Amino acid sequence: SYAVLDISTGATIEHNADAVYYSASSIKGPFCVSMVRALGAEARGRYGDAIRACLANSDNDAYRTLRKDTYGQTFFRDLADEAGVKVDLAHWYNDYSARDLARYWAACDKWLAAGGEDAAWLGDILQDTLNSQVDDIAGGEGVTTWSKAGWYPGGDEGAVTFDGGAVHTGTGDYAIAVAVDRGSD
């Protein structure tokens, strides 16, 4: 499944974009954006190392810390509402579609692209995250990418590799999400 969303026009190129998959660690990107967007310098000061580990290395312990310490706060629901995506806050990992992940990244892009110290700090981390292919494929001279991949080898949720992000080019800005029903291997 894939969805490529033109952030300016809302036009999409997609295939099987509504098939639902286990989010795996791809949810960490939108979650951390929502957290830093809402908490600003407090998030950077108190959780900066955990955010960096969560995104750059896909560290599950760091994500667990962030979720445990901020559980019950509304910032992730606020981002989901803005993106038009249904979210289940009772579970730290959700099931969603490539269309949903592209919508999350379109909402994240609005805040990241607006700039500011917190957005620039987080944007630097999101430019080079573990196993995301968004920068490798869509990046290049004059292109900025922010992304986060996730993968799961299988089990009750099924095998999945999910990647998504935002891409800024000279000809437009796009949110991209790709999901396959194969684990990281």
Image: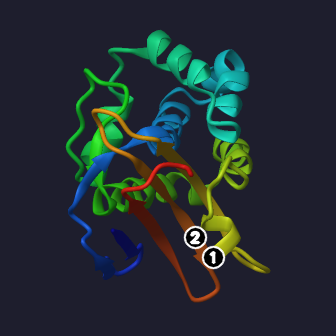
For the residues labelled 1 and 2, say whether their Cβ atoms are less than 8 Å apart: yes
50 over 104 or under it: above or below: above
Camera-side residue: 46 or 181? 181
Q: How is the image coloured?
A: rainbow
- Residue 68 vertical placement versus 21 (above, below): above
Tell me which residue sits at (21%, 63%) in the image.
18
The vertical placement of 70 against 98, above or below, is above
Q: Where residue 94 sits in the image (x, y, percent)? A: 30, 36
| Along the viewing direction, whichever of 89 and 114 lies nearer the viewer | 89
**Element type at mark 2:** strand
Task: Locate the N terminus and report the quarter of the image it occupies.
Answer: bottom left
The kind of residue tagged 2 is Val
Asked which secondary structure carries label 1, the reply is helix
| 160 and 69: which is toward the camera | 160
Residue that lies at the very extreme toward the bottom in this rendered image? 171
Give the image location of residue 93, x and y in percent.
36, 32
Q: Residues within 10 Å of mark 1 (few under 14, many from 20)?
A: some
**Image-quadrant location for residue 52:** top right
Spatial separation of the CA atoms under disc 1 and disc 2: 7 Å
Report whether 138 appears left or right of 15. Answer: right
Report whether 155 appears left or right of 87. right
Percent coordinates x, y for residue 88 in the rendering: 23, 31
Q: What residue is shown with label 2?
A: 167
- Give the mark nearer the N terminus: 1 vs 2: 1
**Which callout, 1 or 2, points to the residue nearer the camera?**
1
| Residue tagged 1 | 138
User: Which residue is rendered at x = 51% and y = 52% of the image?
Assistant: 111
Q: Residues within 10 Å of mark 2 (few under 14, many from 20)?
A: many
Which residue ends up furthest to the right in the rendered image?
Answer: 141
Residue at 24 percent across and 49 percent down: it is 85
Going by the numbered disc 1, the residue's amino acid type is Ala
Horizontal relation, residue 71 to residue 129: left or right:
left
